[in-house]
Amino acid sequence: MVQKPPKKPLLTTRQLGLAAAFAAAAFAFRASGLVITLAPPLVIDLGALMPCLAGMAAGPIVGIIVGIARGIPSGLPQIDLVLQPVKGIYWAYVYKYVIMRIKDPKIRWPIFWVITWLLQFFVESPLFIFANSLLGFYPFYPTWPFTLGWYTALYGVYQIVVFSAIIAALPSVFGWKEGKAPW
């Protein structure tokens, strides 16, 4: 009889722990209402960054789990339950296959900052605004051009600062020193 190799689990213990930690943070930040309100409906909150960080630290499945946890207490769950997991997925792959391919941390940091800002400017903002306009919450035009200026620039810088602080504080969680995504 031929023995089959043991099946690899869908998620490791490390990934389950990170999913629980990031999901709890994502849910708590949004459910508590700890947001900076800008021009309605625009807000800045730490919970929206958790799916991205979870994807970077533990992979796309963890990014999906955390994105769902972030979407549940949202003011617009029909948008966030779909798009927050998407952020976890694409951040996982951008982090692993683009950012972590750069071996020198002195070069990796500025490239990470530029990619973070570009993703916010050209992917995240248009994606969320378009989804909101499809469901009739607010119009794509003039909302998107309005957010292309100060809001996206401000939010991109905020995202860079938070991502950099967390990665610098916990480099082993993100594989930063090793130059390899830990998932």
Image (cartoon, rainbow, N blue to C red):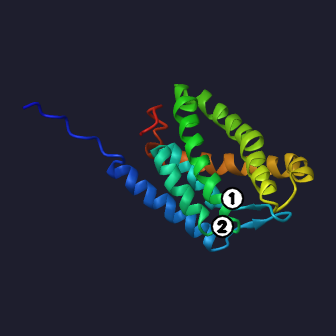
Based on the displayed image, in which of its 4 quarters is residue 90 positioned? Answer: top right
The quadrant in which the N terminus is found is: top left
Using the image, tell me which numbered label, if any, was put on residue 126.
Answer: none
- Residue at x-position 53% and y-position 64%: 25
Based on the displayed image, in which of its 4 quarters is residue 107 positioned? Answer: top right
- Residue at x-position 65% and y-position 65%: 77
Q: Position of residue 118 (x, y in %)?
A: 73, 37
Callout 1 amino acid: Ile
**Classed neighbour count for the residue bearing mark 2: other residues with Cα under 10 Å, few (<14), some (14–19), many (≥20):** some
Residue beneath label 2, please? 74
- Residue at x-position 43% and y-position 43%: 172
Instruction: Residue lying at the far bottom in this picture: please name it.
Output: 32
Mark-to-mark CA distance, 2 and 1: 9 Å
SS at mark 2 in the image: loop
- Above or below, 180 against 55 in this view is above
Q: Position of residue 37 (x, y in %)?
A: 79, 67
Residue beneath label 1, please? 79
- Residue at x-position 79% and y-position 50%: 130
Along the line of sight, which residue is nearer the eye, 157 or 119? 119
117 with respect to 108 (left or right)? right
Along the line of sight, which residue is nearer the eye, 138 or 171? 138
- Above or below, 93 against 101 in this view is below
Frontmost of labels 2 and 1 is: 1
Along the line of sight, which residue is nearer the eye, 23 or 165? 23
**Classed neighbour count for the residue bearing mark 1: other residues with Cα under 10 Å, few (<14), some (14–19), many (≥20):** some
Q: Position of residue 64 (x, y in %)?
A: 52, 51
22 with respect to 116 (left or right)? left
Q: Position of residue 39 (x, y in %)?
A: 86, 63
- Find out whether the residues at labels 2 and 1 contact each other: C-beta distance under 8 Å: yes
SS at mark 1 in the image: helix
Q: Earlier in the sequence, mark 2 or mark 1?
A: 2
